[in-house]
Image (cartoon, helix red, strand yellow):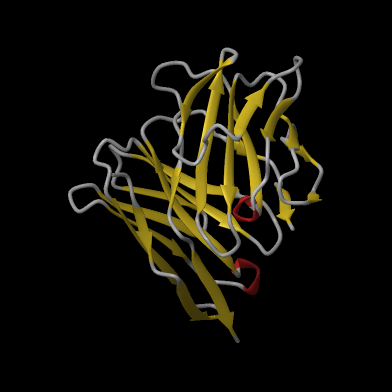
C-alpha cells in the first residue's frame, strides 16, 4: 500500500544545514511535498516537486528527488531557530488527490 | 490572502455525542478534503469531496462519519456518535479546479482540536 517513511528526530546547530530524508512506496506518485508544522499550528506547504524533476531550489530550501530509489530529501541551508518545527514529507498521485503524509521529522536547533 | 477557516478551534464532547466540525473553504475552490492527526501521529486522509459527492474516502471514514456542503460556502464533517479514539486535530483543505497538467495546491485550515471525554 501507500506509505511514506521518515526519521522522527533531527538536531542541528544553528547556522548549519539540515537534511531531512524521506522514502515513499507509491511509484505512481506525481507530486512530492514538504510541509512544515509549528507547535499548535496547521500545515504550511513549504515546497513541492513534480516527479519528473530531480531537484528544486527555493531560497534556503533544496529538494532532491531520486525517483528510482523513491527517496526525497529536504535541505535547509543556514538553519535558524525559526526553522524549529515538524517537517512532513508527503506524496500524491495528482494535485487533486488525497495526500499521504509521513510521520514527520521534528527538527530542533541547538545554539 | 484567501484562507481556509475552521470552527470551532477546540471542541470538547462526551463519548457518544454527535459533533459537527465546520470549514469555510476558499471561495473559488471546488475540491474539499478532511484529514485528521491524532496527537503525536501522522496526518491521515479521511475523505475528499467534489461536485457534491464523495470522490474518495479512507477506511477510517466509516458509517459514523459524513460530510456535507449545506450551502455555497460551508463544508462540514459530522461524527454521529463520537468515540474516545476520535480525539484528534481535524484539518479541512480545499483546492481550485484542476486543469490537466496544472498544479493546484491544497490549502489547509488551522484545524479543529476535538477532545472526546
> Residue A8 vs residue B25: left or right?
left
| Residue under the point 68% across and 35% down | B80
- The image quadrant that residue B5 belongs to is top right
Relative placement, left or right, of A104 versus B82 is: left
A10 w.r.t. A94: above or below? below
Q: Nearer the viewer, residue B38 or A18?
A: B38
Tag count:
0
| Residue at image point 62% right, 36% down | B107
The single residue placed furthest to the left in the displayed view is A68
Furthest toward the bottom, the residue is A111
Q: Position of residue A19 (x, y in %)?
A: 40, 68
Is A12 positioned to the left or the right of A23 in the image? Answer: right
Residue B53 % position (x, y): 55, 16
What quarter of the picture does the C terminus of chain B occupy?
Answer: bottom right
Q: Can residue B25 be seen in this view?
A: no
Locate residue A106, reporting x and y percent: 52, 70
Nearest the viewer among B113 and A32 is B113
In which quadrant of the rendered view does residue B6 lie? top right
Can the viewer see residue A6 in this picture? yes
Amino acid at each position: 500500500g501507500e506509505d511514506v517513511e521518515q526519521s522522527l528526530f533531527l538536531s542541528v546547530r544553528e547556522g548549519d544545514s539540515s537534511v531531512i530524508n524521506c522514502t515513499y512506496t507509491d511509484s505512481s506518485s506525481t507530486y512530492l511535498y514538504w510541509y512544515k508544522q509549528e507547535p499548535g499550528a496547521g500545515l504550511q506547504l513549504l515546497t513541492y516537486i513534480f516527479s519528473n524533476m530531480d531537484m528544486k531550489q527555493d531560497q534556503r530550501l533544496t529538494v532532491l528527488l531520486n525517483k528510482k530509489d523513491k527517496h526525497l530529501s529536504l535541505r535547509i541551508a543556514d538553519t535558524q531557530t525559526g526553522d524549529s518545527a515538524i517537517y512532513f514529507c508527503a506524496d500524491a498521485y495528482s494535485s487533486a488527490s488525497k495526500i499521504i503524509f509521513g510521520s514527520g521529522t521534528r527538527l530542533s536547533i541547538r545554539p | 490572502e484567501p484562507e481556509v477557516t475552521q470552527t470551532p478551534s477546540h471542541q470538547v464532547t462526551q463519548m457518544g455525542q454527535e459533533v459537527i466540525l465546520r470549514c469555510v473553504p476558499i471561495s473559488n475552490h471546488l475540491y474539499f478534503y478532511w484529514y485528521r492527526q491524532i496527537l503525536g501521529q501522522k496526518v491521515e486522509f479521511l475523505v475528499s469531496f467534489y461536485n457534491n459527492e464523495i470522490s474518495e474516502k479512507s477506511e477510517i471514514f466509516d458509517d459514523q462519519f459524513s460530510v456535507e456542503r449545506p450551502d455555497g460556502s460551508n463544508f462540514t464533517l459530522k461524527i454521529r456518535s463520537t468515540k474516545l479514539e476520535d480525539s484528534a486535530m481535524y484539518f479541512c483543505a480545499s483546492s481550485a479546479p484542476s486543469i490537466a497538467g496544472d498544479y493546484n495546491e491544497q490549502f489547509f485550515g488551522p484545524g479543529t482540536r476535538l477532545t472526546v471525554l
